[in-house]
Amino acid sequence: MAVESGTRDGSPQHDTAPPGEGTPALRKGTLGVADIAFFVVSAAAPLTVMAGVAPLAIGIGGIGAPVGYLLAGATLALFAVGFTAMTRHVKHGGGFYAFITRGLGRPAGFGAATLALLAYNGMQIGVYGLLATGTQDALEALWGIHVPWPPIALGGVFVIWYLGYRSIDFGAKVLGVLLVAETGILVLLAGGVLLDGGAEGLALDSFTPGNVLVPGTGAVLAFAFAAFTGFESTAIYRREARDPGRTIPRATYIAVGFLGLFYAFSVWVVIQAFGGTKVLKAVATDPAGLFFTATTHYVGAWAADLMHVFIVTSILASQLAFHNAINRYGLALAQEGVLPKALGKVHPKHRSPYIAGVLQSVLALLVVAGFALAGADPYQQLLLWMNTPGMLGLLTLQGITAVAIPFFFRRIRHQEGRWRTVIAPIAATVLMAGALWLVIAKIGLMTAAPLATNTVLVLTVPAAFAVGVLLAVRFRRSRPAVYAEFAAEPAD
């Protein structure tokens, strides 16, 4: 394991002088707790997850499915204990790769950087397939119009590019509005079901051991962990946060707690809407329409129409959140000297990493156009083939970060306590490894693809990490100064 050189407190010292006064930089002190939480929760796309994926979880795990989301949330909250402790000591804007470098050394950090680029791009670009199908469904349901999917997806690329090009506070406001809309429609459904009393009376049998400990629980957990994707991106916004030592941990806990409770509550509500004895039949009959049918019955057809619209805006919000995260990874790596210097430019007015945003959008255009020209299905292939390595990559990065946390705190002076620096991270490592195993074991349920395709999708993750390690070896030989300063603390 490589040992970093450092300052008196053990923090690596970045020797590069900060940019001059005339050099545009990210807008500091812009984002508060709510802003960052909006980015994180929006990336998870709660309405889309509930309407699109939760019915599958209910169909596989039965009425005990809500507990799977609570267990996934509790596991990620445990991970957040050490993760947020580390955010107070690592001021670098590189997110996962900076954390892993500081704990496990530069080769692992390079591997984490390339894996993060793969994972976030996979998540963001794949969702253009979901945007296309979601918009098609909305147009057909509301006006009976059919539009081919490629123009919708390609148009979405330009919308996301523009929103990412604007200032981060503008993006936070947009996400705040969209998030209130998508969660609000589920709150309306919950209110209707609770006031009516449900189809068979409100019951808590979803939380009894007999309904939780069933053969499908493992698959439910796999779906549940995938539903939290993106919550860890709080650390990426450190340079733009107000009082990041407090803002980042609070936003992380709020995001994890909200998602875990909101997912579990929403799944329980839709079960009550149909009744514990009838919901499985409803899922088998029309899984895609489960939430729409419940909303029409308990709130009104107008609310179901709104749900169609808000699913589209939910997807756009998720894409914008991932787009912003990718751009900040690209910015950080360009300023490290790993990626081309041009990607490290910040817009003088909007203070956004606009060159990185252009490159990411061009990549999205090429991938979406490639799938369209190949005649691919936007959901089964563009979404699932791109999202699966992305989701697995982010879970892997979380697990490696959990491993890195105790090693990092062994190197520095701190007053965090053993719970935050040793016990919780080790427990999180074990649980994250189990979560990753569950997701891989149930990958066929998520992709509906043949074994050969699933094998390629899974192996893409270690391959991306290995590319980063090889890149580290190359940089150590050919560009030792860049290698030595990789993920070092900023001078300012």
Image (cartoon, rainbow, N blue to C red):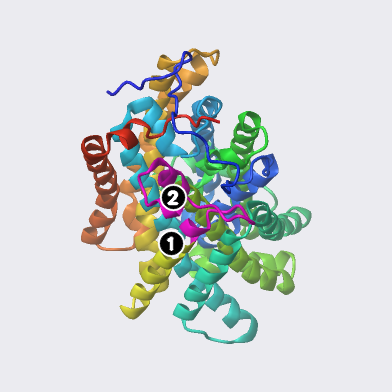
Using the image, determine if residue 223 lies above or below residue 405.
below
Q: Position of residue 196 (x, y in %)?
A: 76, 57
- Please name the residue shown 60% across and 65% down the image: 311
Marker disc for residue 330: 2
- Residue 420 pos. (x, y %): 51, 20
Q: Specify the amino acid type for callout 1.
A: Leu
Nearest to the observer: residue 147 or residue 57? 147
37 inside magenta stretch: no
User: Can residue 23 be seen by looking at this rendering?
Assistant: yes
How far from the left and from the top, in percent, is residue 190? Answer: 71, 55
In the depicted view, which residue is nearer to us: 377 or 280?
Answer: 377
Mark 2 surroundings: few (<14), some (14-19) or many (≥20) residues within 10 A: many
Circles 1 and 2: CB atoms closer than 8 Å: yes
Q: Would you say 148 lies left or right of 373 here?
A: right
Which secondary structure lies at badge 1? helix
- Please give the label number shown on residue 359: 1
402 in relation to 277, above or below: above
- Magenta part of the protein: which range? 331-357
Residue, x 59% and y 68% (percent of image)?
312
Mark 2 belongs to which amino acid?
Gly
Give x and y (percent) for residue 213.
45, 39
Q: Secondary structure at mark 2?
A: helix
Q: Can I make out residue 286 in this image?
A: no
